[in-house]
Amino acid sequence: MRFLPLTAEDRQAMLAAIGAESVDALYRDVPAAARHPEAIDLPNQKTELQVERAMAALAGKNLNCSQAAAFLGAGNYRHHTPAALDYLIQRGEFLTAYTPYQPEIAQGTLQVLFEFQTQVALMTGMEVANASMYDGATACAEAAAMAQRITKRKKVLVSGGVHPHFADTTDTFLKFTGVDVEILPPDVMGLEDLIGRVDEDLACVIVQTPGFFGHLKDFSALADAVHEAGALLVVATTEPLSLGLLKTPGEMGADIVVAEGQSLALPVGFGGPGVGLFASRSKYLRQMPGRLCGETVDVDGKRGFVLTLSTREQHIRREKATSNICTNSGLVATAFSIHMTLLGEKGFTGLAEYNHARAVEAARRLAAVPGVKVLSSTFFNEFAIAFDKPAADVVEALTAKKVLAGVPASRFYPTYPELDGVLLVAVTEMNSDEDLDALVAGLKEVLS
Amino acid sequence: MTETRTITGNRGLMVEERLIFEYDHQNRTAVDVPAVEPYEDRLGGLRRKGGVGLPGLAEPQVVRHYTRLSQKNYGIDTGLFPLGSCTMKYNPRLNEKAARMTGLADIHPFQPVSTVQGALELMDTLSHWLKQLTGMPAVALSPAAGAHGELCGVMAIRAAMDARGENRTTILVPESAHGTNPATAAICGYVVESIPAEESGRVSVEAVKAKLGPHVAAVMITNPNTCGLFEPEMIEISRVVHEAGAYVYMDGANFNAVVGRIRIADLGVDAMHINLHKTFSTPHGGGGPGSGPTVLSAALAPYAPVPYVVRDDKGFRLVEHERDAEGDAKPFGRMKGYHGQFGMFVRALAYMLALGKDGLQQVSGDAVLNANYLYARLADVLSASFEGPVMHEALFDDRFLKDTGVTTLDFAKALIDEGYHPMTMYFPLVVHGALLMEPTETESKAALDQFIEAVRGLAERAKAGDAEYFRQAPVHTPRRRLDETLAARKPVLRWTPPQA
Ligand SMILES: Cc1ncc(COP(=O)(O)O)c(C=O)c1O
């Protein structure tokens, strides 16, 4: 087997050195009643070429986004991946390293994490960021748990503009600890009143920018009301590119900012892995979940980096830890950070502007299609439109024309019939003029 | 140790590299973005005021920055990485190639399911392999790592208890458990009670029995355990736990020792996570991403979280909402966004197909053989904590360093100078100054022999009284020992612009 270097002679020599008769003899502690390898019904090993073909066959059964005009978002966004990015994250020193427990031989990973934390803090307008969570949804759940620890309160209010997966993950994460998570109905028109719902039982209010249906809101007044009530404001985002163009959550008064970082790190990849961004205020540092990388010096006085404040973490604190997270999203955070470095100030803000301009153009053209109503008055690179017929049917009909028109709201909200006609349309630099022409033409045909 | 100072501070291939923020903040970019024609924005007045504060680099600068940083890292590709409990095995490049196939990378989680039948089939096939390899009837694929899989299992236990109308408060966790076990139990609202280990490093039925009662919801037990030993009384333990009306959570982080040779179901387990980033070779990436599918017994299977794949006469589809669950399924909720760590599923399946049943049996056999070889060849110079044979890893403690003035930490740092990543230190907590070595099956005998020579040599040096050598180590690294106390006392967690 090509991954296994031991030869038959090696094995014999090693058994002799051990003084065991066979490898089986080494399994002497395993009860015989549990040793039934014959009951495992699986094929034997394959050559690399065979495996490649098997995987390619599976890949071939999907319609991939490059084979269609794809306007899909709803939390995962397609952006161009620079060639240098995918090359750099495949360097074995990044790819095959472990969590940097031995800082003397992990300064590469550690410096990347330090830079990543800085980038996330700058983008979100926050003071500190951690070294990543699993994804945006789990980061959101951890933010609510952190707010609960800080305020000692047992109620969480989730806006109807928050991604439903973020909301559901938060609910699942907290429900067994007796925290009441109230999730408001989908805020399709962006008209939800949150300030009127703030009270002194709340640990936090969770909102999202851009909202799930695209809307942009200034949460500054909400932040004031939330703080007045002694609660925390958690601001989520699923499209971090938007932070290149929009007023930051930090500026609006957020206490914790969480985000799904996939869009700037990796291809959409069927939704995973992603990377959870997690930023907060310095005063809450010791309540933050996850790993933190900090600056220090070595014995020669040279600057270096280490994992720090680990007394918050499970390996030290065990049942009193702020979170149970261990493995996080290191390589995706690395990809995110490298992409941010490649973009730089000019590329990041420029790409954000370009995405918005493309989306504005798309919304303008779609608004002119009979039977299409654009619902979002403000948006970044994704907006909601509505038809008189089920959006899922429209999507199916357009799929046959190699147009992946968007994500029907009914996929997330099957029990809200009033959302059946709603479609989320995301437009990025990946969508060419021809894609947009195909979407407009396809919709005209299907809706007429 | 004297060092010739260079003008640049660089030392040959060890090149100093500043932070990206310390490059000049010029108006460069490594990504050309098309110019935007004048247009009327739809931002509702929420445009960002002022810059972000990011530096601007050209592509060659960026590639050099990260190449230099990468060269300050030790990975499996660099050399032997005997980090116990972490299963640092070789990550086949075929996995990476497969994960980058356009038909597997450029698919969106919310495309119509009719257009992602290959992706759903892949998830279904992975589930099939994991169920066959464990003998368990169900698997939840969505957990993002081992600890997240623990959470999945414990939440399923909690949901099952709720369904039974029982309000049990406590989860039993052996002392030797990984920190994530008690942390997970606590997150689910359970009180954690510890089970002491036996002299032999194993957990006994008697010790479990002594703690069981109507307040106990589950026992979380790692097997093979973190001392590298198989729990010989596991079947018996499961039986008494079940008799007490509780469930058995088995931490499967160490599945590599037994894969293809035993079925977890035959041990009486109700839930177990599998770290795809350990046993099934998906890369650790400097700390993730991982994937922690959790296999479930018939008793817990109905509570598996959404989403999951089902197959009917029209093909594969996803159950994404609790209310869409059919039959006796009562999902306890959702654990993360989207559909799980799909990119890790691709890599793990590529690995499984490559090895097959026979190859996986060879994997566990060679992993155990390599660990026992280390154990046998080092037992006379180090202090083995427990009697073997061991499974996939060998545990030593610091008795061999007694009166040498050398600590486990010093010893590990000296190994760095020898060109190795150290073993896991100070874990598990059940022995003093633990040194836990897991060579994995992807090391050759020659590589092990060289490592053994280095460890033996260092042990002799320590016993010969050269404590100062160890206290100085490492000296051949980009940075020497770092001041962790300073880092924690005055946390600097980001770059800030120098004060003007
Ligand atoms: C025994 C054991 N359990 C659980 C875990 C947690 O797994 P993960 O880091 O994937 O969350 C680990 C990982 O180091 C482990 O060694």
Image: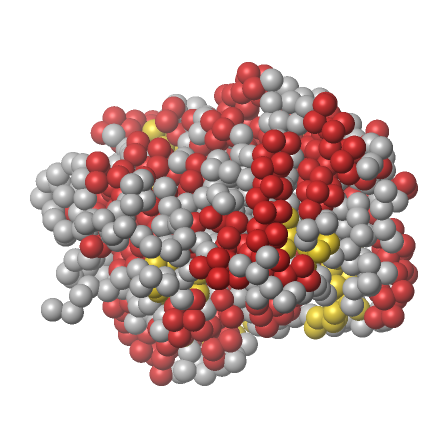
> Which of A3/B147 is in front?
A3
At x 42% / y 78%, what residue is drawn? A231
Question: The C terminus of chain A appears in which quarter of the rendering?
Answer: top left
Residue B305 spot, x, y in % from top left: 63, 51
At x 82% / y 40%, what residue is drawn? A27
Looking at the image, residue A189 lies above or below residue B417:
below
Looking at the image, residue A415 lies above or below residue B315:
below
> Which of A164/B92 is in front?
B92
Choose top left, top right, bottom left or bottom right for residue A317.
bottom right
**As drawn, which residue projects farthest toward the left?**
B38
**As drawn, which residue projects farthest toward the front?**
B464
Looking at the image, residue A93 lies above or below residue B114:
below
Residue A281 spot, x, y in % from top left: 35, 71
Q: Is residue B498 left or right of residue B172?
A: left
> Which of A312/A133 is in front?
A312
Looking at the image, residue A250 lies above or below residue B479:
below
What colour scheme does the image use? secondary structure
Question: The N terminus of chain A appears in which quarter of the rendering?
Answer: top right
Label count reads: 0
At x 26% / y 39%, what residue is drawn? B64
Report if residue B319 is visible in the image.
no
At x 36% / y 73%, what residue is drawn? B490
> Which of B414/B205 is in front?
B414
Residue B200 spot, x, y in % from top left: 82, 58
Report if residue B21 is visible in the image.
yes
Residue B411 spot, x, y in % from top left: 55, 56
